[in-house]
Image (cartoon, rainbow, N blue to C red):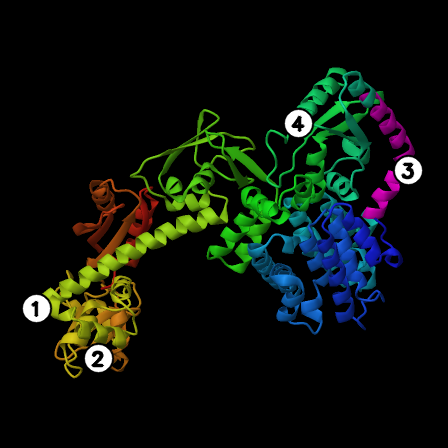
Amino acid sequence: MSHSKDKITIETLLSKAEGYIKEKDELEKIKEAYLFAKEKHSGQYRKSGDEYINHPLNVALILTTIYADSETITAGLLHDVLEDCDCTKKEMEEHFGVVVTRLVDGVSKLSRIHFSTDNDYLIEYYKKIIVGMSEDVRVIIIKLADRLHNMRTLWAIPEEKQKRKAKEVLEIFAPLAHHLGIHKIKSELEDLSLRYLKPTVFYDIAEKLNKTKVERDRTVNEMMQEVSDLLNDHHISHEIKGRAKSIYSIYNKLDRGKKFSDIYDLLALRILVDTEQDCYLALGIIHSKFRPLPNRFKDYIAMPKVNMYQSLHTTVFGVDGYLFEIQIRTYQMDEVAENGIASHWAYKEHKDASKLMQNTTEQKLQFFKSIMELSQDKMSSEEFINSVKEEVLNNNIYTFTPKGDVIELPRGATPLDFAYKVHTRVGETTVGAIVNNNIVPLDYQLQNNDIVKINTNKNAHPSKEWLNIVKCTQTKNKIRGYFSKNEKEILMERGKEALEKELRKKKCSIQEFYKEENQKLVFETLKLDNLDELYLEMGNGKYSPISVVRIVFQPEEEKEEVKIKPVVMKEDSSSDIIVAGIDRIKVSLASCCDPVYGDDIIGYITRGNGISIHRSNCHNLAMMEERCVEVAWSNTPASKYEVSLILYSNTNENKLADIIQKTSRMNVNIDGVKVVSRERVIVYEMEAYVKNVDHLEKLLLELRKEPYIVNVERLMQ
């Protein structure tokens, strides 16, 4: 295709399109779109000085090189009209129909992006990509063609912008073209990006290629002749061509430390045959004469890449001892490899092109689903970017279930990632993995082509340790989701239990409390929507049971004091507390938050019961600031302080004896332990006595070390 702007006219475009679009009315639509766009862009010019219409015309022409359907080409011609011209969606729909307008609108969404930093730009960009993708994959194809023409005219903008655009293309657009299987566009985007990002490197490689061109061409022609004669002798109809390596792919190899002279696939052939069977026959015949290089054979026909790419790859010692990389594929495979899913084999088979494209997208492009799934998970923008770049756009590995289903995973993925990809329930109940008939640990890094069998147990549950093992962001979010849901249920259960216990203690009618008008009063007072929210807020300590009960059963003026309880301490209970400005006063520790020697504390002046000592973060003090007084611990602590602990386990196996034994070894007296919840995993509530905050911290640390303990928290009531 000519890159010269002067030679490109609507006639050039139509003549290319006529090569594979046979319907006259479709060609007419393309011409109509050109005239419509030309009129709308009238008087507009690009930075290169060209009339603006030259850009959409070039974009449409690029689309014909990958045999895009007529709707895509029409939308390509119109892709900037909604964004830059005086044209409404309604007007466009009247002229070109709903589908074309939707495509143009999709491209417009991607073009509206303004950004200040790379990160903000990437965040917005990926999100816009998803919007476009979720409706029709052709939006991305038009955007790729648009970006390719922009790269061809990148010389017209300042150098700093050139580098930014080139980096953007290399990180986002080229990988997208790769995942869509459009090799032609991918390759040119990469080369153009390198030219602007690292011009010295680019021209250095180009120069070296030119210097070695004569010798390379002679060697390649000789090898082509020998292979061709060989295939003719065996009556295999074929076409054979030398294949130029892109400058970017050579740069990549040099960047990985290879020498220019060592890059053996600079010499490359592509053999095209009629049938899949001929591919394997040709391979066998070539190997019978030219010795293959070990470990360089790849069969992408039996196992196509996710972007539908199919081909046999082998590297052989060819003429004069040179290494040749040879690709063998059918003509149809070649079209898909070069032109991606927009390829015109749909026309050849007389099927509906857009329908076939949509079906193919559904079946093959896990890539789209991966990004869509990622976007639905709650994650920060930074995480989203990294996961798209690492998990979706990088080289993935392909693993298999024992039945032969392919599971695509990022490099570094573990059997747990595999299990969650099969199904969340499989992931949650995983107890072990067998890879290629060998038992492996759950943190084993899976390799390409591994066959993975996951062992499950319906009573098993995830462990928080798994978060350090798994690779996929999506898997991490599913594991986090499991624990937050599980902990939420436990908190709600705890809140409900505490509320009803308080109602019984106060001899209040539980039925009365749950009457509709009383519930409504509680929800309005606390600004909550339902009982579940109330239980949750009580379970996590935001509201105490007594304050909730008081809303319904006690008038505002009768504010009862927070109940305090005597504590096992020295006879003179005030000896371990110093109250600011007061010498002798009755002091007791509040049972709602169980202060321990060394905690930050505050005093609350009760009515007729001295001062109750609370931890300074106790929620019961939130409404009582005016009656608080400064207090401090003295140098004579009591021997023991009571604490309430909640222990979350990851198993439904009763570990009570183990917990008691471990606690006793720490010189901690246990007043009682009870099981709070045991639906899927056991949660324990423990009352214990410790000497001070340090003693308590050591206890928490030791308990958390146990593999079956997920977390330990101090309880506030």
Magenta region, residue range: 202-227
Residue where numbered disc 1 is placed: 507
Residue where numbered disc 4 is placed: 276
Badge 3 local density, few (<14 within 10 Å), some, or many (20+)?
few
Instruction: Single out the mark in the foreground, 2 or 3.
Output: 3
Name the residue: 68% across, 35% down: 333
Instruction: Single out the mark in the foreground, 2 or 4.
Output: 4
Tag 2: amino acid: Ile
Instruction: Single out the mark in the foreground, 1 or 2.
Output: 1
Q: Residue furthest front?
A: 24
Badge 4 local density, few (<14 within 10 Å), some, or many (20+)?
some
Residue where numbered disc 3 is placed: 211
From this viewpoint, is residue 193 visible? no
- Residue 638's quadrant in the figure? bottom left
Compute the Cα span from label 2 to label 4. 96 Å
Compute the Cα span from label 3 to label 4. 38 Å
Badge 2 local density, few (<14 within 10 Å), some, or many (20+)?
few
Q: Which mark is residue 582?
A: 2
Instruction: Single out the mark in the foreground, 4 or 1.
Output: 4
Taking depth in this image into account, of 480 and 696 the one nearest to the observer is: 480
